[in-house]
Image (spheres, helix red, strand yellow):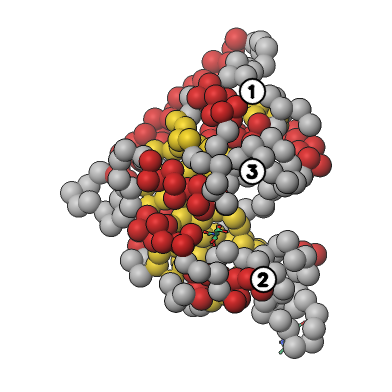
Amino acid sequence: MKEICSSSSSSGSSSSKSVWIVHGVVAAAAVGVAISAYAYRGGLFRKFRSRVVGIIPARYASSRFQGKPLVSILGKPMIQRTWERARLAITLDHIVVATDDEKIAECCRGFGADVVMTSESCRNGTERCNEALQKLEKKYDVVVNIQGDEPLIEPEIIDGIVKALQTAPDAVFSTAVTSLKHEDAFDPNRVKCVVDNRGYAIYFSRGLIPYNKSGKVNSQFPYLLHLGIQAYDSKFLKIYPELAPTPLQLEEDLEQLKVLENGYKMKVIKVDHEAHGVDTPEDVEKMETLMRERNLS
Ligand SMILES: *[C@@H]1O[C@H](CO)[C@@H](O)[C@H](O)[C@H]1NC(C)=O
Ligand SMILES: *[C@@H]1O[C@H](CO)[C@@H](O)[C@H](O)[C@H]1NC(C)=O
């Protein structure tokens, strides 16, 4: 797999006219984002859980895919793509990459990201987010854990889970689901979720839930697929990694069950999104094909 890191990977010269048009659109979009960000943060009252940081945990060593954050996706490192998408979210006051790896850190500083170095002993992304949070100078009320391997993550999803936590004081955790494709119904790597009628999570499973009495997929039922992104109340994040593993968590190998088994509330938002995570080197090519098809670059 090709690893890259160049902050100067802009691709050649297109006609100057089209460059102008693109810049115009980008400028207009930037003004729009700035105004809505201002409107969102402004106002006379400070919102509940108003200070929000997005953390992108990234480690170099991975059993399945060594150096994954730096893999080139159509000429840009994957982590840069994720970071660029996250920057479009209007609810984040700050975005940092949390890594234990100098090479990743250097690459990220190169394209302009803030980096927090975390120890190699972090056993998962949540621990890394927690350590990074403690090392940040400013205080934050909400932490969004943005997986570095979803380079097409939509900023609206980030904003959605942040707002979900801000409007549900009884929840300490928020996350997103989308429609499950029926062909994925029995794929244990696709995690399913069921929610109550106020949008709080009831359960997550690698098995199909709910399970139709017939034993078959019910083509009428709107099954939900869990997306990896999650946000936490920062006080909860401090204790989350320390909570002892729970029986359902261990049985399903799903971290988030620990939250529910301990009686905490989790708010779930439903979004329209196709998940395109990059888990293996083979996924890189699929991702590039998809981006070319959709004219994303
Ligand atoms: C199961 O799925 C079928 C459609 O496949 C649906 O008609 C039925 O209501 C569902 N529930 C039960 C209990 O059968
Ligand atoms: C992360 O790893 C630690 C140590 O294995 C574990 O206790 C914890 O449950 C894991 N997950 C989270 C979300 O903290």
Q: Nearer the viewer, residue 123 or 217?
A: 123
* Residue behind mark 3: 149
The amino acid on which the numbered mark 3 sits, given as a three-letter code, is Asp
The amino acid on which the numbered mark 2 sits, given as a three-letter code, is Glu
Height in image: 123 above or below 207? above
Height in image: 109 above or below 268? above
> Is 45 left or right of 258, judged from the image as shown?
left
**Image spot of residue 208 (x, y percent):** 72, 74
Upstream in sequence: badge 2 or badge 1: 1
**Image spot of residue 156 (x, y percent):** 50, 48
Label 2 to label 3: alpha-carbon separation: 22 Å
Q: Assess mark 2: CB under 8 A from ligand 2?
A: no
Q: Circle 3 — which element? A: loop
Q: Residue at x 42, y 57 (%)?
A: 237
Q: Quadrant of the C terminus?
A: top right
Q: Residue at x 31, y 55 (%)?
A: 49
The amino acid on which the numbered mark 1 sits, given as a three-letter code, is Cys
Q: Circle 2 — which element? A: helix
Height in image: 103 above or below 241? above
Upstream in sequence: badge 1 or badge 3: 1
Q: Quadrant of ligand 2?
A: bottom right
Q: Nearer the viewer, residue 213 or 279?
A: 279
- Can I make out residue 231 in this image? yes
